[in-house]
Image: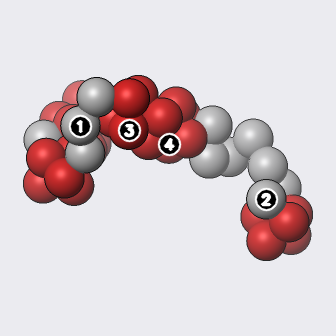
Amino acid sequence: MLELSIQIGTHPFWDTLSGGDVVAARSALKHVHDTPAGDADAA
């Protein structure tokens, strides 16, 4: 789990964001499994 966390946290994707975009992206990533798979298109 620690290795996965390190890979996610150091991924180059995060360098493409700044300020509030980072916060919004991290929040979305934390809650990605809160929506059932069939409802993902509705968002």
| Of the two numbered discs 2 and 3 in the rendering, the one whose residue sits closer to the viewer | 3
Between marks 4 and 3, how big is the CA–CA gap?
A: 12 Å
- Residue at 86 percent of width and 66 percent of height: 42
Q: Which residue is mark 2?
A: 43
Secondary element at tag 3: helix
* Disc 4 residue type (three-letter): Leu
Q: Which residue is mark 4?
A: 29
- Residue at 28 percent of width and 28 percent of height: 19
Crowdedness of circle 4 by 10 Å Cα count: few (<14), some, many (20+)? few
Q: Which residue is mark 3?
A: 21
The residue closer to the viewer here, 33 or 27, is 27
- Residue at 25 percent of width and 45 percent of height: 17
Secondary element at tag 2: loop
- Whether pointer 3 and pointer 1 mark residues with C-beta atoms closer than 8 Å, the reply is yes
* Disc 3 residue type (three-letter): Asp
- Whether pointer 4 and pointer 2 mark residues with C-beta atoms closer than 8 Å, the reply is no
Secondary element at tag 1: loop
Query: Residue 27 location, x and y as percent?
Result: 52, 31
